[in-house]
Image (tube, grey):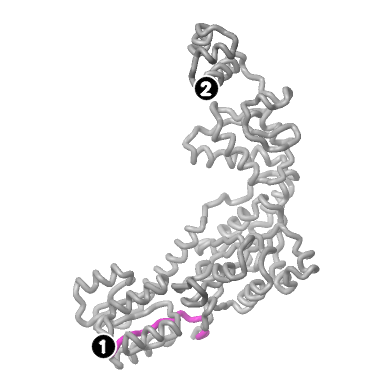
């Protein structure tokens, strides 16, 4: 028999004592069971017990089972509800489903039917958690980090062994180095790949909001807590929880997280029952956690718990040989998103990328390439499309006029003239005579240049 504190909980609501007793005996080995004979008693039990599943008879003596269903779904959309009735009609079934019931059982039903229904509902709950995780941005990634530099090669070599383990992982590195990408790779190559991947950036979140996000909360736990909300510990289930910027987490939340990791259980904010915590934790930080521990801003016991597997993401300036590969990897999805052909990168533009310091790392590279794609007029990204000056400072695109002469692209003269003439007409608001006057040429010459 499973640990009672960690078993799923079911609330049986039926006015017939023989039905309640029989169902309780059938389910007691696999479920923690509570029963109620009336709708009002069920409402009290629901608030105290916080069940995963509620089995409700339609014909209750005080309030309708349909009304009880509505009450349950109003306060906790994630709680699964199974309706049952000895005289079910199509109207009742339809009404139950509209209000959110997972399924409807016709009395009398045998044990096999009940077990099959509960298994189906359990799968629906798991799928619901997976969908919640997907809405938080879960994506399919490649099987390894893109790059050929020694640092990336070493990480790719470690990746398989790290993924197969179940220990917590600590990923260190500057902002924008790809810590989230590494976390997803570990998840997708692990035995938990079928489970959800759930991520949260801890930076800037208050203690109360962070606790609510991680642990969830019960209805009435604090002001405006109108419904029961599952936390990321529950949504992650038997998958992976990725906490970015762990160094920003408040000390009391660190203590609760450590307890959940060590005891494999937790409670929602305002809750009184233990829930399972079977996720794998991957944490990331751009801070020096050793110094944070020394200065009292990070718990030493949590640091030692996280520091089982420690990975260091190298900054982009230390892996510049990876730039051509990273650029190609970034441009492919960008071109698809924008509905444009995949552009080439000129040799001078790639040289410029290779000479830049990249303080924002891979994230900044993506931003630069995205900006270039948004303003690109041809099929090739040139130096002036990048918006990077000679000192390595990112600048808005200016058409190339503000770049030093050594950074200009050498282009066919007719092409340069055509671009300049077209831009002059646009700058003059489409007034051809005004544009010709500013260019110090006749209108007929301007027309000829435009036709060319």
- Magenta-span inclusion, residue 14: yes
Secondary structure predominantly adopted by residues drawn in magenta? loop
Labels 1 and 2 touching (C-beta < 8 A): no
Residue identifier under label 1: 61
Residue 95 on image: x %, y %: 25, 70
Residue behind mark 2: 426
Q: Position of residue 137 (x, y in %)?
A: 51, 55
Q: In this image, 127 relative to 362: left or right?
A: left
Q: Please report the bounds of the magenta region as a residue range.
A: 3-15
> Where 348 sits versus 235, above or below?
above
Name the secondary structure under disc 1. loop
Res. 376 image quadrant = top right
Percent across and percent down for residue 40 are 34, 86
Give the residue at x 47% y 62%: 132
Look at the numbered disc 2 and give the secondary structure of its residue: helix
* Mark 2 neighbour density, 10 Å: few (under 14) some (14–19) many (20 or more): few
Looking at the image, residue 96 sits to the left or right of residue 5; the answer is left
């Amino acid at each position: 028999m499973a640990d009672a504190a960690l078993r799923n909980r079911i609330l049986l609501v039926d006015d017939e004592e023989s039905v309640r007793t029989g169902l309780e005996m059938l389910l007691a080995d696999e479920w923690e069971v509570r029963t109620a004979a009336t709708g009002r008693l069920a409402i009290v039990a629901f608030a105290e017990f916080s069940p995963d599943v509620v089995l409700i008879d339609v014909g209750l003596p005080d309030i309708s089972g349909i009304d009880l269903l509505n009450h349950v779904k109003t306060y906790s959309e994630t709680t699964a509800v199974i309706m049952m009735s000895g005289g079910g009609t199509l109207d009742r079934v339809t009404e139950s489903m509209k209000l959110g019931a997972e399924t409807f059982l016709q009395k009398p039903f045998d044990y096999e039917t009940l077990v099959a229904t509960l298994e189906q509902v359990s799968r629906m709950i798991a799928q619901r958690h997976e969908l919640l995780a997907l809405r938080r941005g879960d994506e399919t990634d490649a099987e390894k980090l893109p790059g050929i530099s020694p640092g990336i090669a070493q990480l790719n070599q470690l990746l398989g062994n790290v993924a197969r383990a179940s220990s917590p992982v600590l990923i260190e590195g500057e902002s924008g180095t790809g810590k989230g990408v590494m976390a997803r790779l570990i998840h997708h190559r692990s035995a938990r790949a079928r489970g959800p991947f759930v991520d949260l950036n801890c930076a800037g979140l208050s203690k109360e909001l962070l606790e609510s996000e991680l642990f969830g909360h019960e209805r009435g736990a604090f002001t405006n807590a109108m419904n029961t909300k599952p936390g990321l510990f529950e949504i992650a289930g038997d998958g992976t929880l990725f906490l970015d910027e762990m160094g920003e987490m408040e000390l009391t939340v660190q203590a609760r997280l450590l307890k959940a990791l060590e005891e494999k259980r937790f409670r929602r904010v305002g809750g009184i029952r233990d829930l399972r915590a079977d996720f794998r934790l991957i944490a990331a930080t751009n801070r020096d956690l050793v110094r944070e521990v020394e200065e009292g801003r990070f718990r030493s016991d949590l640091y030692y718990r996280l520091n089982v597997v420690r990975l260091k993401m190298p900054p982009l300036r230390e892996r510049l040989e990876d730039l051509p590969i990273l650029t190609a990897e970034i441009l492919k999805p960008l071109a698809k998103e924008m509905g444009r052909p995949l552009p080439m990168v000129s040799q001078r533009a790639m040289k410029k990328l290779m000479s830049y310091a990249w303080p924002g790392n891979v994230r900044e590279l993506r931003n630069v390439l995205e900006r270039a794609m948004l303003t690109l007029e041809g099929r090739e990204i040139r130096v002036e499309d990048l918006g990077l000056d000679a000192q390595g400072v990112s600048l808005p695109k200016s058409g190339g006029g503000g770049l030093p002469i050594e950074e200009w692209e050498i282009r066919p003269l007719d092409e340069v003239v055509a671009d300049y003439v077209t831009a002059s007409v646009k700058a003059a608001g489409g007034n051809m005579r005004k544009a010709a006057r500013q260019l110090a040429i006749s209108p007929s010459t301007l027309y000829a240049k435009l036709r060319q």
